[in-house]
Amino acid sequence: MDEATCGQMVYLYNETQVNFAGDSKAFFCRHGAPGSPADQRGAALRIASIDIGGGTSDLSVTQFSLDDGLGHNVKIIPQLLFREGFKLAGDDILLDVIQRYLLPALQQTLERAGVAHPAALMDTLFGNQGRLDGLSTRRQQTTLQLFMPLGRAILQAYEAYDPLDAGAELAATFGELLSQRPTTAYCTLSTRRFSASLVLTRRRSTFCTPRCCCRCAICTRRFYPDRSASPPACAPFAKWWPITPATCCC
């Protein structure tokens, strides 16, 4: 039994046992199809429901009929008419909110702050370009602690949206939408590590060649001119430059 059908069971139980005091026939007569004959009005009831979960959406159409019992002894007999599941669900809606509203808003804020090449920076941070830089864990943490709570806050505000209000809009900062902000220590550590990674990636792409690490001292002075020590081998050099001998930039 899928989630959509389970929702129908809960609905029927609440309506018949709570709102109609256990009189199932009265409930069926009340919600029977309009225009049907009086003697057939409470014979059957067709219910369609959709359940939107995180990963899947389920649609179910069931026809319920009553047996020949009397009073509270009437039994409800279900007959499943249609059932289908879809891969489009709540996570996809949340992803659309992040891509259409949050990321463009962040890029506009970077532009107003005077950041050079904000579009390229956004592509490096959150686009396909930076997927192989070893910072996927940081991106996941940013999504879990920042973007997903912001997206849920927008969807929650949309639940109270009035379609007849043409001037309705949501104007708020990220801080105003977040009920719990990421800790300062986490933000500082993430910024430092990400900035350091961008520098290392840029230097590696400019100087590194697939040769053996035979002159590490040259690399050390090139990238760290303030270092007085010049390690002669790869093992000590790895403490300062986290690459393997096969990819050393000598």
Image: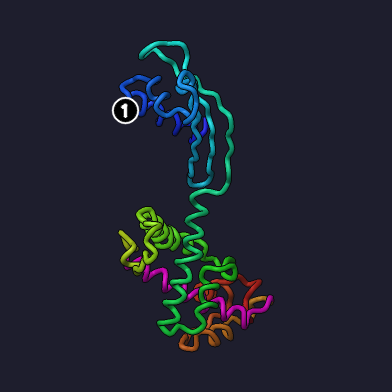
Q: Answer yes or no: is residue 149 visible.
A: no
- The residue positioned 58% from the left and 40% from the top of the image is 85
Residue bounds of the magenta highlight: 183-210
14, above or below 240, in the image: above
Magenta-drawn stretch contains 11: no
Question: What amino acid type should be assigned to the residue bearing mark 1?
Answer: Asn
- The residue positioned 36% from the left and 13% from the top of the image is 71
- The residue positioned 59% from the left and 78% from the top of the image is 204
- In-image side of 139 versus 70 (left or right): right
Q: Quadrant of residue 74?
A: top left
Q: In front: 38, or 250?
A: 38
Mark 1 sits on what residue?
A: 19
Number of marks in the image? 1
Magenta-drawn stretch contains 206: yes
Q: In front: 147, or 22?
A: 22
> Helix, strand, or loop for circle 1?
helix
Question: Percent from the top left, x then y, of residue 27?
Answer: 39, 25
Q: In front: 59, or 93?
A: 59
